[in-house]
Amino acid sequence: MVSDEPYVLTTVDGPIGWLTLNDPERLNPVTRARVAELNVAARALSDRDDVHVVVIQGAGRAFCAGADVSQGQPAADRRVPLGGGALLPGAPADWTLAGMRQPVIAMIRGAAVGFGLELALQADIRIASEDAKFVAPFAKLGIISDTGTGTWLLPRLIGWSKAAELYYTGRKVLAPEALELGLVNDVRPEADLLDFTRALAEQIAENSPWSLRIMKRLIFDGLQHSRGEHLLLQNQRFNERPARPSEEGAP
C-alpha cells in the first residue's frame, strides 16, 4: 500500500536544497503520481534564486528501487507519447533533474534500480555509499525505459559498449565497479556519506549562482551540439555575464 505521507520531502538549508524520496520501508519506489510529485518539487526548487545547488537522496537504505509494479498499469502495457517525453504525467521533455537550473548531486545509498538508476544519471554528480548497487533491469522485464534518460545519458557517461553491456544483461553493478566505470564520482563509507556530500554541496554553493547555472546548461547541452554551435552559445552566454563578478543574475 502506498503511504499517505508525501513521497518527496523538500528542505532548504541555506543555499542547498534537498529532495528526499520518502518511502523507506519499500525502498522508495515510484508510481506515476509520485513522479509527478517529484517534478513539481524539483521545479519549485529550480525556480528559487536562493538555492544554488540541489542534493537528491532516498530515505532509509535505498535510493530508489524503481517502478512500483503493484500500482497502476503494467509496464508492458504502457504507451509513451510519440516524439519524446516520459509517459508519466507531468514529466518534462528535458527530464526532472537535468532540467533544473542548479547543479544536482545524487547521494546514493543502496539500490538505484530502473527508474532509480535513470534518475541518478540525470544528476550532475553522483556520490555513492559503499553498499550502493545499480541495475537496469528492463531487458529482464521485457520492456524498455519509458523516459529514455539512461539509454541517452549512460553511453555518454561510461562509453557506448559498456552501457550496452549493462542494458543488455541487466546485471548488478556494485559501487567499486561503478566508480571504476565513471558511473559515480566517489564512493564513501556510509558513516561519511552525508557529511562528504554536504561538504561538496557547500563548496559548489560558494560560487556564483549565475556561473553555475550557465555552466550546467553549457555542459549538458554540449552533449548534442557541434563544436561550432557550442562555441557560438558559449560566446553568447559569456557576453551576458554580470558587469562585475560580484553581481549575480539568473539566466
Image (cartoon, rainbow, N blue to C red):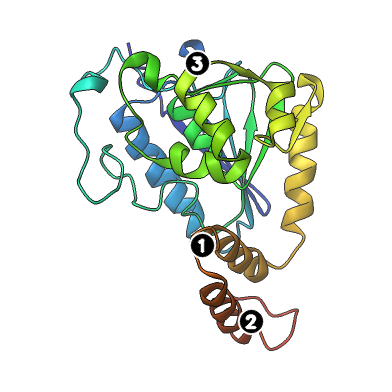
- Tell me the distance, in whole angstroms, between the alpha carbons under discs 2 and 3: 43 Å
Q: Are marks 2 and 3 in contact (CB under 8 Å)?
A: no
Q: Which residue is mark 3?
A: 27
Tell me: residue 75, above or below residue 35. Answer: above
| In front: label 3 or label 1 | 1
Q: Are marks 2 and 1 in contact (CB under 8 Å)?
A: no
Q: Quadrant of residue 216?
A: bottom right
Tell me: residue 243, above or below residue 221. Answer: below
- Label 3 CA crowd tier, 10 Å (few <14, some 14–19, many 20+): many
Looking at the picture, tell me which residue is in the foreground, 52 or 114. Answer: 114
**Callout 1: helix, strand or loop?**
helix
Q: Residue at x 80, y 21 (%)?
A: 189
Q: Residue at x 60, y 83 (%)?
A: 235
- The image shows residue 62 at horizontal and vertical percentages of 57, 19
Q: Quadrant of residue 86?
A: top left
Q: Which residue is mark 1?
A: 221
Q: Which residue is mark 2?
A: 238
